[in-house]
Amino acid sequence: MPQKELKTILKEHNFLNVATCDLENVPNIAPKLLLKVENNIIYLCDYVIGRTFRNIKINPKISLGFMDLENLVGYQFNGTVETIDSGIVYERMLDELSKKEIELSVQRIIEGVDKGKKHNTFEMEISQTVVILKVQVDEIVEINANGQLRRERLQ
């Protein structure tokens, strides 16, 4: 399971499910907007800043997941996360966020016109207060439809 293949698969996804856990072992899962993938680092936008954010502050272990429906393969990325709320990387990811908002809004408008789909809103609107999640991926797990798991440690 080459890393570059997964980077290609991630390009097709806009949101990843983010699983965290607090110190009392209470799990939490929430979708987060995928901004960018660079080597073994995945940048996400946390625009809710709720339980996921609180859990990360006390326990930086994280698991990300998504399903490739075309190939019926699930993926899990395990690693550690840090939050970024200022600085050069933060500003760079805000630029990525702006591009994503436009891209997703355009996609929804085209889909609405092309397929006659009705949406409550076409424009992607994200809170002005966001935190960037910088996930250092240490392990990739591929989950095939037959239940077979393949693990790859990165380092």
Image (spheres, rainbow, N blue to C red):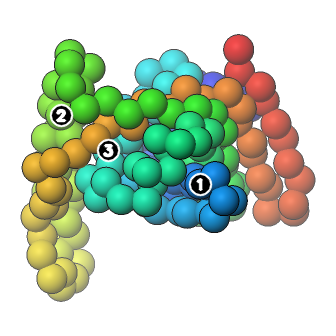
82 relative to 2 in the view: left or right: left
Residue 87 pos. (x, y %):
20, 19
Q: Name which residue lies at 77% across and 25% down.
A: 153
Q: Position of residue 149 (x, y in %)?
A: 85, 48
Query: In this rendering, is residue 61 above or below 114?
Result: above
**Residue 15 x %, y %:** 41, 54
User: In the picture provided, is 88 more to the left or to the right than 11?
Assistant: left
Amino acid found under the numbered disc labelled 2:
Leu
> At numbered mark 1, what does the secondary structure look like: helix, strand or loop?
loop
Percent position (x, y) of residue 33?
Answer: 35, 50
* Amino acid type, residue under disc 1 in the picture: Asp
Residue at the location (13% across, 41% down)?
98
**Residue on which disc 3 sits:** 45
Q: Is residue 71 left or right of residue 46?
A: right
Identify the amino acid type marked 3: Cys
Residue 135 seen in the current view: yes
Distance Cα–Cα, label 2 vs label 3: 9 Å
Q: Mark 2 points at which residue?
A: 94
| Disc with the residue nearer the chain's start (2 vs 3) | 3
Q: Is mark 3 on a helix, strand or loop?
A: strand
Distance Cα–Cα, label 2 vs label 1: 28 Å
Q: Which residue lies under the disc numbered 1?
A: 22
Gap between marks 3 and 1 measured at Cα: 20 Å
Measuring 53% from the left and 42% from the top, which residue is drawn there?
A: 58
Label 2 close to label 3 by CB (< 8 Å): no
Observer able to see residue 110: no
Q: Label 2 crowding class (10 Å Cα cut-off): few <14, some 14-19, many 20+?
A: some
Q: Say which element carries label 2.
A: helix
Q: Which of 31 and 144 is in front in this view?
A: 31
Q: Residues within 10 Å of mark 1 (few under 14, many from 20)?
A: some
Vertical position of residue 63 compared to residue 79: above or below: below
